[in-house]
Image: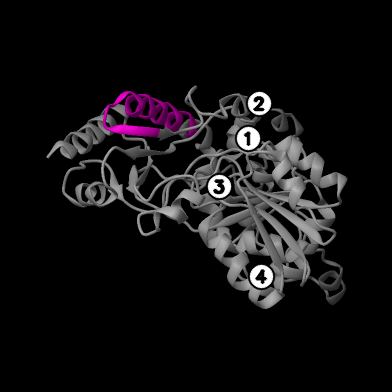
Amino acid sequence: MNEYLQDDRLIMTHYGDDYSRYMGAVVPPVFMNSLHVFPSVEDYYAADRLQEEEFIYGRSGNPTVRLAEKKIAAMEHGKMALCFASGMAAASTAIMAVCKAGGHIISVRNAYGPLREFLLQYCVCHMHMKISFVSGESVEEFEDCIRPDTQLIILESPSSIVFSLQDLRAVAQLAKAHGIRTYMDNTYCSPVFQKPLDMGIDIVMHTMSKYIGGHSDIIGGVLVSKDEELMRKISADIREWFGGILGPMEGWLVLRGIRTLQVRLEQHQKNALAVAEYLEAHPRVKKVYYPGLKSHPQYELMKKQQSGNSGLLSFEVDAEPAKAAAKINQDIFKVFKIGVSWGGFESLITMPFYKLQPEDAGKLGATPGIVRIHCGLEGAGHLVDDLANFLDSMEN
């Protein structure tokens, strides 16, 4: 199977699928069992639950989930991957595995909102940790925040609302020089369009309800690393204790999503770029946030780190936020639906900063009127028609 490791498309479609084991089935079965039995007591105690072919109990591992982990690790060029019941379970586990009480974390300001709340409401309040937030647009910001007790740097590039990037190679090099671990949310690009581990990042996380799942029918998360010792520690000391493993049916759905990930991402990107270019040229749009546009201030950095972009973008309308929200609430859209997630087959629209005060939204790089859309698989023409109706309605 090693030849499959040279091409992401082969990893996604065939890597790890041993057809001879399952009566020639082209799709491996879902293992719905909660436990495994052994021929002897000695075999039970000798079992290593992290070995590919050895399983004991569903809380520590499952054959279907293990295959999903194997494929994702290969796509990310990691040594080991671990699947979790949600993206937040994966993210919080990474922090607990790396950080100790009283330590210091540096995080990009535009990290995933619930992750920021976990840092502020749990890590600060219960673990007495200190958090420094930075925009992340310069390496010097990170360097200026480093302290003797800094344990982790949290990245998300591009971020999922204003789509700012961090220089992953430079930040990883800085962190290693100071003995600091780095964590990166790679959900936006997926392993298809960005491989942070190859740029020196220690831990990569994906929310699998997004592109890896791709069909808006699962909740899941995954961590990947080249550090096998760290991943074994995460599995045995945290995931198994807290019980946050992905279920076998969700693992099977992840495998289904992985098989079409490449072609879906390419279509999402094609649709989003067409929509972004339309919006950029529209007189009622003040600004478009999409790393694939040549006008993006970090376009050159994007080309160095990413091989593509996905279907998510934002824009600012030349109108009061309340008016934009009122128009979105009307029955204007035929395709876009109001929803907070993204990465599935469907197109979505939301106003993520609408309830923020202008100064708070400004700290995050936008205004309360920013509109975020996910361009699904319905076709760019339909999405442009929907947005044209929305923008034209602003005249009324």
| Three-letter code, disc 2 | Lys
Q: Which of the 4 quarters of the picture holds residue 16?
A: top right
**Label annotation for residue 180:** none
- Between label 4 and label 1, give the one nearer the viewer: 4
Q: Is residue 278 magenta?
A: yes
Residue depth check, mark 3 versus mark 1: number of the one nearer the observer = 1
Q: Position of residue 99 (x, y in %)?
A: 76, 64
Residue type highlighted by circle 4: Cys
Find residue 194 and name its label. 1
- Mark 3 or mark 1: which comes first in sequence? 1
- Asked if residue 164 shows in the view, the reply is yes
Q: Label 3, label 2: how many angstroms apart (C-alpha)?
A: 29 Å
**Of callouts 3 and 4, which one flags the residue occurring earlier in the amino acid sequence?**
4
Image vertical order of residue 295 relative to residue 138, above or below: above
Label at residue 255 = 3
**Whole-Å distance between the Cαs marked 3 and 4?**
33 Å
SS under mark 2: helix
